[in-house]
Image: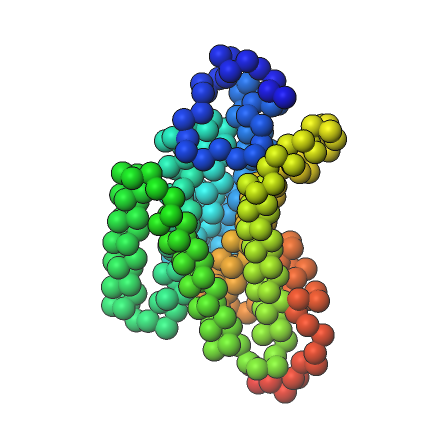
Amino acid sequence: MNATDPADYLWGPPTSKANYCETDYAVSRYVAEFINSLTNVVYIIYGTYGLRQLRRKDKYNDCLRALPYWGLIAVGLCSFAFHLSLKYHTQMMDDLSMHFATTPVLHRVLTANSNRRGSVIIGIVLGSILLFLVTFHVITDELVLHSVSFVGAVTLIGVHTIRLVNSRTLPGSATRQRIWGIVRFGAAIFNLGYWLWILDQWACGFLAKSREAIGLPWAFVLELHGWWHICTGIGAYIFIAVVDHLVSGEDLSQQSLAWPASWASTSIFAGRGPVDKVSEKQK
């Protein structure tokens, strides 16, 4: 199904340790994995949207608030470079960008109730851990510690986000109900992306045969690693935006969240229970 002979690949033969189920250079000699490259635009769109909202609120120069969105954009650019070329050095960029994106968010949730000194100390600790992970991963090219540390960081962000929701919103209030809707949806779509990523590897043979039978363009729907990009891009944006709201203390009604976060805040994920109007008035 390759569109060109391997000798004609623009980027040369793949040298990366990871190579996903999408057929290499099936669409163009210029792009190793077309859908896996294209879908990275999701990270860039949501990261850019978050930065534009900060600029609109005149908070663009707040480094702690802007850095997570820049990290999201970096993930999109680095992952695009990797899937475009399937080279070892671009794989390193893709792998490490995930840590550079999660670390600022982790710092925000861990220092939400800290003073400046505590925030600096935690920043130094996280920076040291990040430096160790980067150095170890580049030297050894292993994937176990990389994967475990990333999942651990995402889990910590999720746990502390739940604590922030419970501590910084009033029980029974409409604000808490809306935030819970956003958080539940964000967790659900992130997990969906993870299982699609797993399925893309486990069922690669079946997916490849199915795509060949269906033919283009509908075969693109079965490029599950591309769906992983879409799902995690949405999920990452949601948690970054929720953490930013909770830590900054801004009124949720004054924030313009991108779709589908705006939809999730009033969807079935938010529940249909009664809202305590008294609590809401006392806010």
Please provide percent x and percent y for residue 263. Answer: 68, 60
The residue shown at (61%, 41%) is 203
The residue shown at (30%, 71%) is 115
> Where is 77 relative to 172, above or below?
above
> Where is 146 relative to 263, above or below?
above
Please provide percent x and percent y for residue 222. Answer: 66, 38
> Where is 276 relative to 7, above or below?
below
Please provide percent x and percent y for residue 167. Answer: 47, 78
Q: Quadrant of the C terminus?
A: bottom right
The residue shown at (50%, 28%) is 84
Side (left or right) of 224 relative to 145: right
Q: Nearer the viewer, residue 233 or 266?
A: 233
The residue shown at (46%, 29%) is 86
For residue 84, say whether it is visible. yes
Q: Nearer the viewer, residue 45 or 138?
A: 138
For residue 77, say whether it is visible. no
Q: Nearer the viewer, residue 57 or 40?
A: 40
